[in-house]
Image: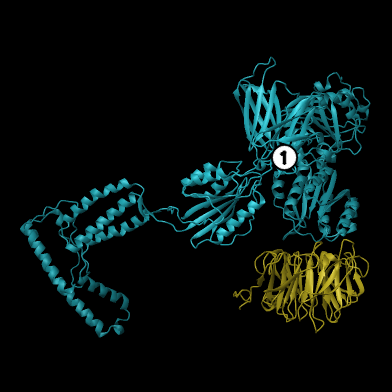
Amino acid sequence: MLAGCGGRVENADAPLVVGARGSGPGRFSFPRGVDVAPDGRVAVADRTGRIQIFSAAGEPITQWYMPKHDNGTPTRLVFDATDPATTTLLVADTHNYRIIRYGLDGRIVQQFGKHGSKPGQMLFPTDIALDTSGTMYIAEYGAEYEDRIMVYSRSGRFIRQFGGYGEEPGKLQRPMGVVFVPPDRLIVADSCNDRLQVFRTDGTLLAVWGKVGKALGEFNYPYDLALDKEGRVYVAEWGNNRIQVLDPSGRPLGVFGGPGANPGEFGQPWGVALTASGDRIWVADTLNHRLQRFDVEATIKPLVAMKQGVK
Amino acid sequence: MGIEFAYPLILWALVPLGLHAWWMSRRLGLLSRGRRWTALGLRAALLAMLVMALAGARWTHQSDELKVLFLIDQSESVPPAKREAARAFVQSSVAQMGKDDKAGVIVFGADAAVERAPDGNRELDPFKSVVERARTNMAGAISLALAVFIGESQKRIVVLSDGNQNSGDAIDAARAAATAGVAIDYYPLSYLNRNDIILEKAIVENRVSLDEPFDVRIIATSTEATDAQLSILQDGKPIGRQQVRLEPGKKNAFVVTTQVRDSGPHTFEVQLDSPSDSIPANNRGYAFTYGQGNPRVLLVDGDPKPNDSLPAVLLAEKIDVNRIGPSGLPQNLRELQAYDAVIFNNVAAGDISNDQMQLIEHGVHTLGMGFMMIGGEHSFGAGGWNDSPIEKILPVDMELKNEKVMPQGALVPVIHTIEIPEGEMWAEKITMAALDALGPRDLMGVLYYGYPGGESWLFPLQEVGNKMRLRSIIKSIQPGDMPDFDRTLQMACDSLSACNASVRHIVIISDGDPSPPNPALVARIKRAQITISTIVINPHDQSGKTLMAQVAKDGGGNYYDVSAYNKLPQIFIKEAATVRKSLIFNEPFLPVTRQSSSILSGIGKDLPLLGGYVGTTKKNLADVPLETDKGDPLLAAWREGVGKTVAFTSDAKDRWAAQWVTWNQYSKFWSQAVRWCLRAPNNPNYQVQMDIEGSRGRITVDAVDSAGNFKNFLDIKGNVITPDLKLLDVALRQVSPGRYEGEFPVERPGTYMLGAQAAENGAAGGDTVTGGASLSYSPEFQDSRSNDALLARLADVTPYGRKLGDSSPVFLHNLPSRADPLPLWPLLIGLAVPLLLGDIFTRRVLVGWSDVGVGLVWLERKLFRRRRETAMTGELLEVKRQVRDRAAQESAAREDFLSSLKEIKKTDGGGGEDSVIDQSGPRRPSGPAIKPVSPVDAARPRQAAGGDGSMNQLLKARDRARRKNEPRT
């Protein structure tokens, strides 16, 4: 297979590695948020305070800086393709207590969020999930013991919130990732409780998946979630330095990665995203200051097959 | 370009060897002419190669490549415009480089750095190297350039400087360059500072009497006749201001008369100002003197509520007291020297920087100052003074060595420093500081978030021991981002709850961003009587601070909001000291007198009750006049270097010493204790003068005895403490009756303090002599014009050196060859080996056409054996047949030749032993084509030589054989 980065011939099973430490185009300092647009373009947020856009082959296309990044930098970004007319990019500008919606040219088209812990105010937003109508489910945390999921309309109007700080089921400690599962579910990466929690979009708790640990089905700081077309859940585990794959009912299918700096290994991955076609996985390999792109066929299928074989 | 020889005399060996070759040629008459000349040629070439190799033959050639190193002076004396001009010149020169040219850049000041190794890039990047600009060391830069020149090329150095060197000798370095064949060109950065006033020095006597007038002398020069305003500050207060007239071309001297009222050192700061002066940086001078009068003591009070009893006592005893808080402690030695003793009254180690501790250590050890630590809950081990420079000079160890009483504290730092710049470095520093403040029986464990281990113990809670092992572990700390406080706090809680230390403490340092700790966990920690202090660094926002403050509040500890990271180690010492509170003994006791001491003179043995003390252990050579009821030191004293120190482990205020404050001997006790450790009074028999000129400091000591006679043959050893607190050993030599001199290097502006011991030759101890001098501004500002003459000398010393102007071509290829000669011996020996083989082959092996044919057959067999049946064509068979015919003819000729030889042998009676013919080889017509023939040993005499009949037959036979072969050659 001829992979697109600089004309290098890649091993079919080896991931494509994009970038290295640095502040120039195509380089990263602790890349944390990653998402893939329907056309395959990849957006990345890192600790330089930049948003970078890459081609599907991993070549840098454009970049822009967040309006402000003295307090801290964004942790997550999400492409919004729910409006068929225009795809936009939503950025959780975590340490400035706001969500910014960018056009793909870097122009700000929407911005909302006011600092505070009351309903409708914002602490540190970490991730955004979008349902089919464009309603936003925003995860947030803070030192105020108010960790929660907030629901905003597409226009940025606060609708409701649920969660709250704590270890009990339904409570959250630093929700770092949230993903919408059609037709009406949310899976939340309840990071500091080392578990995933499944809610109905109205906030009703449906299930709690996993506990702290290294085994299959256990998590160590799950930081981000992605879904493929079959409904499988990809969990970026910050503490276990791996991606864990679950079936739609939360049963573990397998893991890949592990700590290290070789291709295929991760250093505290903060972000995971799938292409619209579901054939490629992008991982923000944070501590290694790079992205890695995996082929689903080559990476996941053996895990699934093995799992089925075990059964 | 050509060949040169390292040992040309060896070439004479060619003469006898040539004769030998000529002689040998006559011995080879048996061989055909061609073979003879070939053998002769090969032998001669072989011998020539060997002789040339022995003679050290080297290939020299001219290199067309030219490497130019630009040495750019970045020192402070070069005006900014000139520095720009230098850069522009280098830029334009580099842009004009030819294809064989390479340019490199070295920037220099006090040190030199290679900014760019020689290369062909015609662009000049911005300079990135940082050099110390406070001095100029051109010699160092030239030496570095010579080291950078490697390989074959013509080599030039271009010095771009003002020529004002104040370190090293550039001429010496230029001579080395000349020897290496390197040319030095220069591009002068000339300037003449018009209207420049230079205050050369301010001079005052080393010691003055109180309330008696003395002179401060000021020496200044000026480039023009000008008026200036002379102002002088004494100890920071103006004492005079006057208009003065400066004349050019001479040293202008002014005198200001003043007096001092207080004992101790006094500083004079002199300033000369003129509105037209071009360089104000060199208009200032410092001098200082010691006023001889009442001793002065600096009392540093660690208690927010000051202790009034002690200063009152000292003042009554004619000891001047300056009372300050820990933050007012002097930051330099000159200020500290104002005092004859420093007293720390219940001062915590965390309130004093390590540099300040070192100042005190130097002040006591080298300069003879006194030091006393008075106890309290922040003092000694309980104040975190373990392993500090202060512990070094005190007569007690901060640790309790008494096995019976072993209180332990336990400390767990939680390290989350990744969010600040150089977070790893700070993690190491603060953890090390905390470790230092603990005693060997205390417990410590360090928690952090590591990669890939997650929440981890850097080392689990354990006895600190001798700290060596833990120090090496701490050096490896690599804290990562910590997502959550809960798990680390849980780990700390579990470990601390399980240990039996009497004081248990957690210190968290973080930006406050991890997920907040569960309040129930914090409450559980508090219930376990474990305290938590927090330090917030670089928080994202106020919420991080609020969280950290809340955790400290709930955890019953201290909260620090720190933006100056260099304060962190002191905070960690302070926090570590909280687990040292177990060293405090809050029980009343009656002091026990153990030794007589001048401190206790006239006080008697019945001392009042004290309410507590801090446990310490006596050091080996310390005197302990008073002990506690448990046998721990209460009052300890010793000599430390030139000075003396005292430790009093209880306090001097109304807490523990409530009954002492009202005791009628209180005043006598403390005045005697302080007087015991005061700096020894100045010995009037020694006059010390310290002077700094350029980069050298000079010390002059005049010694007389009490009768006024010169003291000769003294052994004076001095230590100079530099402004950056380095100690320089200076030996003073006697230069005339009673006069001793020494020198020391001066590298930076600031105060240089001298502490010296003058002993009779061979005697121990001796008199203490102190002095000091200041360099008020960088030596770079001592000259008001450039030194073009020095630069010209540099160029003169090296051949082909030139002065360059703006349009001068730099890349001139006119230097003599400096290509490294290439040694030729490996080549010569390499050639000699095949020549030797060729020589032997030529003389000993005869190759004819038949041999070629046989060779072809053999080759054909080898190559075509498998395909012979099919591949052998009629043509090949024909060739084979022809070759075989020739071989048969040749064989017949050879038979003929050999039979002739046999006949000759018969007629000669066997012939000479040299003419043995080996006939052992196979003789089949198609047999091996190469046959051994007679070896002709030229080294032995041939009996058969001569024109006799047998020889003629032999020659004829050979001619016949040759004729048969001729048509085929």
Q: Which kind of residue does numbered mark 1 sit on?
A: Asn
Question: Which chain is represented by cyan in the image?
Answer: B
Q: At 79% across and 37% down in the image, what residue appears? A: B330
Q: Quadrant of the C terminus of chain B?
A: bottom left
Q: Quadrant of the N terminus of chain B?
A: bottom left
Left/right placement of residue B171 relative to residue B439 reads: left
Looking at the picture, tell me which residue is in the foreground, B750 or B308: B750
Residue on which disc 1 sits? B283
Q: Secondary structure at mark 1?
A: loop
Q: Is residue B725 visible?
A: no
- Residue A2 in the image: x percent, y percent? 61, 78
**Residue B889 percent location from the top left of the image:** 15, 74
Q: Is residue A59 left or right of residue B375?
A: left
At x 65%, y 51%, the residue is B130
In the image, B598 versus B612, the foreground residue is B598
Say which chain is yellow: A
| Disc 1 packing (10 Å; few <14; some 14–19; many ≥20) | many
